[in-house]
Image (cartoon, rainbow, N blue to C red):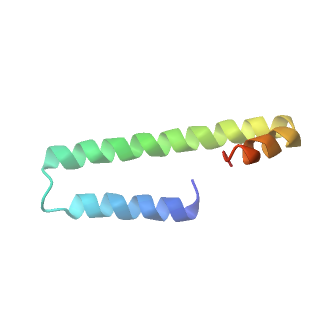
Amino acid sequence: MSQSNLKHMEKIKDTIDKSQELSQEEKSNSMKHIEEWYQEDQAWGTFIEELSEISPKIKALLAELGLL
């Protein structure tokens, strides 16, 4: 995850945590989802990196598809 996206995620988590309108259960569920998205994003980045190592052509194809 890029530094920019990581900062946005932390800001979202902080805002959720400080919310007066959300119950503790809603906050907890929201945090769980954010952590899942983070892990999925990390896994996607690893997958793309490994594919890119196979051939520079694959990296170019993924970029053309808008996946990079």
Coordinates of residue 15 in the picture (x, y in percent) = 28, 63
Q: Residue at 40% x, 44% y: name it.
A: 35
Q: Between residues 48 and 61, which one lies in front from this camera angle?
A: 61
Measured from the top left, where is residue 11 in percent x and y? 37, 65
Residue visible at 79% across and 41% down in the picture: 61
Give the left or right position of residue 4, taking residue 53 as reference. left
Q: Quadrant of residue 3?
A: bottom right
Q: Residue at x 51, y 39 (%)?
A: 40
Q: How many labels does the image show?
A: 0
The picture quadrant where one finds residue 17 is bottom left
Q: In which image quadrant can residue 65 be found?
A: top right
Whole-percent x, y for residue 43 in the image: 58, 38
In the figure, is residue 13 to the left or right of 64? left
Indicate the position of residue 39 as horizontal and vertical percent values: 49, 41
Tell which residue pokes out farthest to the front in this image.
Answer: 65
Q: Is residue 23 left or right of residue 9?
A: left
Figure check: 51 above or below 28:
above
Residue at point 68% right, 49% down?
A: 68
7 lies left or right of 48: left
